[in-house]
Image (cartoon, helix red, strand yellow):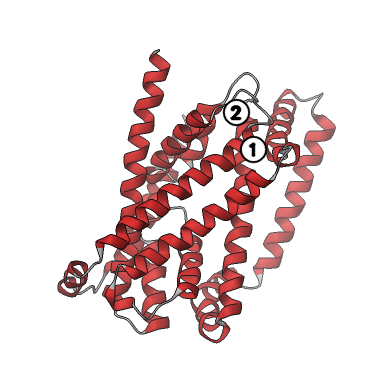
Amino acid sequence: MLKKAANIAKYTLTTILAVVLVWFAFRGVDWKAFWEGLQQTRWGWVALYFAAAVLALVFRTERWYALIKPLDPQVRRLPVWDALNVGNLISVVLPGAGELVRCGYVSSRRMSFDKGLGTIMCERVFDVLAVAAILIAALALKWNTFAPFFADNIWGPFYARLGGSAVLIVVLTGVLLVGFFTAVVLLRRRVRLLGRIAGVLKGLGTGFASVARMENKWPFLLSTVGIWAMYIAMMFCTIRALPQLDALGTVDAVFLSAVGNIASVIPVPGGIGAYHYLVALSIQSLYGASWETGILLATLGHEAHAILIILLGVISYAHLSLRKKK
């Protein structure tokens, strides 16, 4: 009951946060100008956006498959593809829940659920490193343009909220984690609960370290590069779809892609609101375009991706259900 109540509270709060962010993003929008901009959209570039988005999912499947293979040599690519799509579908509504769902689909006698979750943790670490690399590259290429915006609108508000307590929070978190892991190691044989936690942590560690067990690491590394190259290509195609943003180039697509992925960290359903707000703010502040153009860019990219995720998720769920019946 307590777990159920905690989940309800969690999803209620994230939904409220999403509604608030959507309100902030869309308040004051001139809908006439928005629709006029939509009518000028170059749909050929939107088609290329979908192609890049599908390729990004293919690369994600290949990367996850490369991580799972050392743990379960009998795993096949198609079930991994289906599990990934169903997980993405769940995450559109319940942020983070999709990761647990896709672990359940690929779990087997050889690879337990916690090991599967460890592979996803490994993926997330490399994704964070990729976002950081993309952001640093964009800042380096256009420092005078991007650095002030990043400092004033992303890093500044984040640091202001934490204030001087940032160091204290990091230290306390570190002390608590060290204490927790020490207790688990020393008391795992005496306390049954800690013994179970130790088993789960061992499984997570095995899954996380699966990248070190791969005989050929190139598929994993190249797939990671492919994923983020496709994300940048998706942003570039969205920009090119709007005539109002013809002055923007590849470097701008790199920076906007990084900003969009930073927004996706905020735990709201499907990234609704946070993504729209930061992308529209970037377009208005950096390039002097209207807020309506920024909202149109964000809406076009976000909703096109959501449609693709929902469509592929439903197809993969149907396929997995048929396989289960057989």
Q: Quadrant of residue 243?
A: bottom left
Q: Secondary structure at mark 2?
A: helix
State which tag comes first along the sequence, 1 or 2.
1
Residue 313 in picture, x, y percent from top left? 37, 37
Q: Quadrant of residue 121?
A: top right
Which residue is found at the position 70% from the left and 26% from the top? 196
Residue furthest left as drawn: 32
Local packing at callout 1 (Cα closer than 10 Å; few below 14, some 14-19, many 20+) is: many
What's the residue type where badge 2 is placed? Phe
Q: Is residue 43 left or right of residue 262?
A: left
Give the CA separation, mark 1 to mark 2. 14 Å
Q: Quadrant of residue 43?
A: bottom left
| Of residues 283 and 319, the one drawn nearer to the viewer in this rendering | 319
Q: Is residue 13 visible?
A: no
* Numbered circle sitting on residue 67: 1
Residue furthest bottom as drawn: 144
Local packing at callout 2 (Cα closer than 10 Å; few below 14, some 14-19, many 20+) is: many
Residue furthest right as drawn: 186
Residue 46 in picture, x, y percent from top left? 31, 59
What's the residue type where badge 1 is placed? Leu
Which residue is found at the position 62% from the left and 38% from the top? 66
Q: Secondary structure at mark 1?
A: helix
* Numbered circle sitting on residue 113: 2
Residue 304 in picture, x, y percent from top left? 31, 54
* Numbered circle sitting on residue 54: none
